[in-house]
Image (cartoon, rainbow, N blue to C red):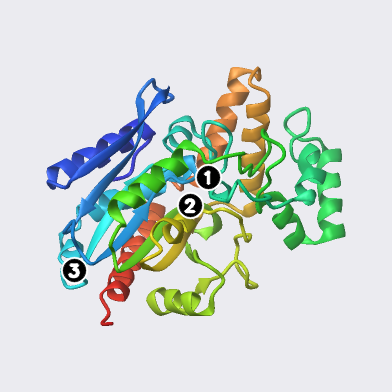
Amino acid sequence: MTFSQSYAQARRKFLDAATARGLPVESHVMGDRTGAQGEALATDTALIGRADAENLLIVTSGTHGVEGFCGSGCQGALIGDEELAGRLGPARSAMLLVHAVNPWGFSHLRRTNEDNIDLNRNCVDFAATRPANAGYRDLDALLMPATWPPTAENDHAIAAYQQRHGMPAFQRAVSAGQYEIADGLFYGGTGPAWSQRTMRAILERHGAGRKRIGWIDIHTGLGPWGHGEKIFAGRPVAEELARARAWWGNDVFATFEPGSVSADVTGPVVGLGQQVCPQAEFTGMGLEFGTLPMAEVLLALRADHWLHRNPQAPAGQAAAIKRALRDAFYGDTDGWKGMVTAQTRVAVLQALIGLGRPG
């Protein structure tokens, strides 16, 4: 089984599988941080196929730390898939697996990184004026009250906000990204995080000179149980969206269009592909696997951020909050694991067909 019960186990499985296949492995180690078990933390890569291939498919896991259980398991399955590897040559492509983009969050069971930064809000131009989010400023005290769990009064106040502004506006205010409240939800930071700098180095190393680059970033936590929503990860350009739908189907959602379960966010990691490798035709997708109902996922996130603000909480309460967060982002059942593994494989096959097309 390629899935794991901790970051330390996931990393060991990934490295062992890659070594057994004889794949080139590179490790980017966080020298100043350790994991929940005292283990070293690193973002590891494994390259399948020719290093000088014309095209490159990137598959990333753990951009949002605790979501790494899913992506790591899917990457392990890809490493062991000999039939899939045989398709790389005809597609003139190599496949780069990037394991644990956010190793600290993966190990410590947080969606954010070591500085409470949401990496999918961090890849912005910090020299420019960062996007304002007055809606989140108004909601922060409600989302993380002084005591946990929330009181009925707190629940009613949030419901009143949702009724007054509408659910889309509430979701946008909560999750689009904010750059003011450093210990708040969906915080984007004040500069490039370690993980962003590491991903830039990986792209400079492996993306240089490629003609086409595809990127699948595996996420969890939104949508129906085990269903993979395909979320367009590119610029709001009709040609790029059309290409993504040609690869992965007309059920690719764009967050700037109606109907997606994900809010339109600022500064996603996948956006680095076009920044660092402008020479390549780029096609990206976030593959978001559903777990629990959205209200339960948000409650688990709020609880974890409350715990971040209140580290003096009783040990039993802290452990319960961490269990709930893990459950919100990891469907730890055989059925769920089979669903996400199969859908990831299909998405990879479709990407290889797109990368290998003539022209």
Q: Is residue 143 left or right of residue 103?
A: right
Quick check: can you spot residue 6?
Answer: no
CB atoms of marks 2 and 3 within 8 Å: no
Task: Identify whether 60 is placed above or below 239.
Answer: above
Res 342 quadrant in image: bottom left
Instruction: Please state the total of marks drawn on the protein image.
Output: 3
Figure quadrant of the N terminus: top left
Q: Residue 165 location in percent, x, y?
A: 83, 59
Task: Check disc 1 and give the amino acid type.
Answer: Leu
The crowd level at tag 1 (other Cα within 10 Å; few <14, some 14-19, many 20+) is many
Q: Nearer the viewer, residue 262 or 340?
A: 262
At 46% from the left and 44% from the top, the residue drawn is: 196
> Distance between the Cα atoms at labels 1 and 2?
7 Å
- Residue 325 occupies quadrant: top right
Question: Vertical placement of 76 versus 29: above or below?
Answer: below
Element type at marker 2? helix
Amino acid of disc 2: Val
Q: Residue at x 21, y 72 (%)?
A: 91
Q: Rounded to the nearest whole Å, what is the CA distance between mark 2 and mark 3?
A: 27 Å
Q: Where does label 2 land, which residue?
A: 269
- Say which residue label 3 marks: 87
Circle 1 residue: 119
Query: Which of the marked residues, 3 or 1, is nearer the chain's N terminus?
Result: 3
Res 59 quadrant in image:
bottom left
